[in-house]
Amino acid sequence: MVNSGSCIDATGEHNSIWYKITIATGGTLTFDLVPNNPDADYDWAIFGPNVTCGSLGSPVRCNAATVIGVGPSTGLNMTSTITNALGGSLTPYCKYMDVLPGQTYYLFIDNWVSSTSSTTAPFSLTWGGTATLASPFTDPATQPHPFNPPGVPAANPADPREVIICVNPAVFDFSTLSAGILNGNPNFNVSYHTSQNDALTGSNAITVPTTVNTTSIYYYSIGYTDPANPNSPLNQCKQIGTFKFKDGKITAKNATLTQCNNNNAGTAIYDLTTADVIGDPTATKKYYNTLSDLNAGINEITNPSAFTSAEATIYVKVTSSFGCTSVAQIMLKFHPVVIVNDATVRSCSIESSPSTASFNLAGAIVTSQNGTVKKYYPSATDAANQTNEILTTAAYIAPSGVVYVRVSNAQGCFNIAKITLVVIPPVYSNILKDKNDLRRR
């Protein structure tokens, strides 16, 4: 920029960037350049129309005003009447431009620094006026769908979005993000970079899987290729964004499920989905009988909420919503079994119905364990299904036979014992019978 015939001749370039703009519809053109730091001093110059990089000529607008007393914002507006402001000027804005469709201009922006002013800062650039700039990013005919930035929002919305990785550092294939970013927009492409300048110029793109970390900021750059005109100025347009990587590693924890080995069946019914293996409710889980099945992805347990098993170890693969995985064990255990024994109850027959007796079922000793609850049933099936319960347990009228008692503990586990009922028939005395015969004589 030295000897360019501009207001910046005296100092040249420092932290600079060039923009090439093409006018879509004619009219007035303004812009606001607003640094993020009030101490940042930005100078700029516009060259054109329709010049080349090797022969820019003198700028049509140029401003190197100071920030002291006037603030850091600068640009073109509708009220200024000057077209050039030398260093130290107190007029940070120049007069708007009248532009025509198809004209091309170069905008040079420089973050001026010196021994007395060393502040560098990002800036925002907003175009105004009645003219519009040609861009594939604002024309629905070229960009019918919105672009989707990669990753998820950071906790602080002002921070770069975050792409989740499952190990840190990780070897990452950036191309896996491209389809999501482009969102079906034709004739667009995306490249990835480690600096903003590279993203703007398309230089030093990351083209192979690369080791990434969670501290660096990465850049994606969306470009356009006009299928009808390889020399179109629109092919130089870039839309860039930033993202970081976030460690999304998950760690599943082992768990134990304990259920009842009812009636000494040797198995219990387990709800594997209740095992507390991870605190993330959005994670998905798949269950397997062996670790080798899990690793191979075969023989998945398809009824995890009602899984019948003896005591065993089950393996669960936990997957987060971002695709990170972890493996844990679920130990299946039995509660202590309810110990019962069969019993026999004998009772004298009822005189009016000598084939039956009144039995006190509660008197049958079927377990020595404390804290149990007993319920009585006419059949083993009823006892298992808890149907047709016998309610008159203290005076159960029945002939000789069997009933069944379901014995349950505090955990709800049960075992079933058999009570044999024996009716003691009436016994008649021969002596009393002989005395009665003698009286009749």
Image: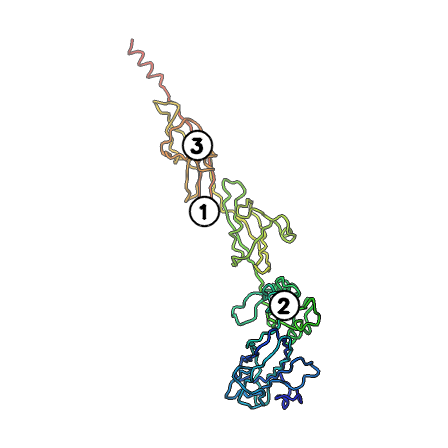
Q: Image quadrant of residue 153?
A: bottom right
Q: Is residue 436 left or right of residue 56?
A: left
Res. 411 mark: 1
* Whether label 2 touches label 1, CB < 8 Å: no
For disc 3, the neighbor class at 10 Å (few under 14, some 14 to 19, many from 20) is: some
Task: Measure how far apart labels 3 and 1 are at the Cα level.
Answer: 24 Å
For the point 57% across and 90% down, the residue is 116
Look at label 2 and name its amino acid: Pro
| Residue under label 3 | 378
- Counting residues from the N terminus, which is met first, the one under dot 2 or under dot 1? 2
SS at mark 3 in the image: loop
SS at mark 1 in the image: loop
SS at mark 2 in the image: loop
Look at label 3 and name its amino acid: Pro
Q: Is residue 350 left or right of residue 49?
A: left
Residue 350 on image: x %, y %: 35, 25
Instruction: Answer whether residue 357 is visible to the viewer in this image.
Output: yes
For the point 48% across and 34% down, the residue is 381
Look at label 1 and name its amino acid: Gln
Position of the N terminus, as image quadrant, is bottom right
* Whether label 3 touches label 1, CB < 8 Å: no
* Mark 2 or 1: the one toward you: 2
| Residue under label 2 | 169
Instruction: Answer whether residue 150 is visible to the viewer in this image.
Output: no
What is the residue that sits farthest to the top in this orientation? 441
